[in-house]
Amino acid sequence: MSITTEPSTSPAVAGVPRRLLQAEGAAVLAVSLAAYSHLGGNWALFAAIFFAPDLAMLGYLAGNRIGAALYNAVHTTLTAFALGAAGYLFDLNWAIDSAVILAAHIGFDRLLGYGLKYGTAFGDTHLGSKGKRAA
């Protein structure tokens, strides 16, 4: 296996570690909801943009590798933390609210078993395969 290719079968977490990652997702979702409430966020806005991070799936129109890279860039807690930190440092409430909503979305995805993507196929994630390839 070279550094530029991925395995033909993408490895996935299974068993107890998978359930722990899903529980961790539930915790991220719960804490994000509590934080958004504490911040006095607009719940209509929350509902309106909760699934906006999934627009990153459009990257798959350019191929699996680009799609996975774009999807993963948006669906990592590092992005949510960076956005939140920028909001805090520069006093940008919209960025803080967006970071909390993004974290909630990521937690929701992990809870449901949707993980970071491999460049092999859309449904190949670190939490297992989803969709037709999973069958």
Image (cartoon, rainbow, N blue to C red):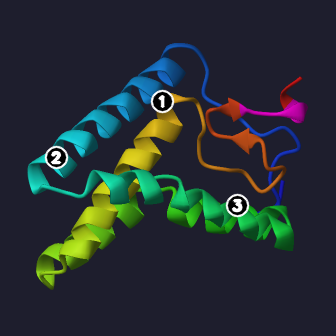
Q: Amino acid at mark 1?
A: Leu
Q: Identify which residue, 37 or 67, lies in the foreground.
A: 37
80 to the left or right of 5: left
The residue at which mark 1 appears reads as: 111
Residue interval drawn in magenta = 129-133
The residue at which mark 3 appears reads as: 57
22 to the left or right of 96: right
Up/down of 125 relative to 16, above or below? below
Secondary element under disc 2, as helix, strand or loop, is helix
Secondary element under disc 3, as helix, strand or loop, is helix
Q: Are there few (<14), some (14-19), or many (20+) residues within 10 Å of tag 2?
A: few
**Mark-to-mark CA distance, 1 and 3:** 19 Å
Point out the frontmost of discs 3 and 2.
2
Please report the residue visible at 76 percent of the width from the left and 33 percent of the height from the top: 130
Question: Is there any visible trace of residue 44 in the rendered image?
Answer: yes
Q: Quadrant of residue 99?
A: bottom left
11 to the left or right of 8: left
Q: Amino acid at mark 3?
A: Met
Magenta stretch encompasses residue 130: yes
Secondary element under disc 1, as helix, strand or loop, is helix
The residue at which mark 2 appears reads as: 37
**Mark-to-mark CA distance, 3 and 2:** 28 Å
- Residue 73 place in picture, x, y as percent: 54, 66
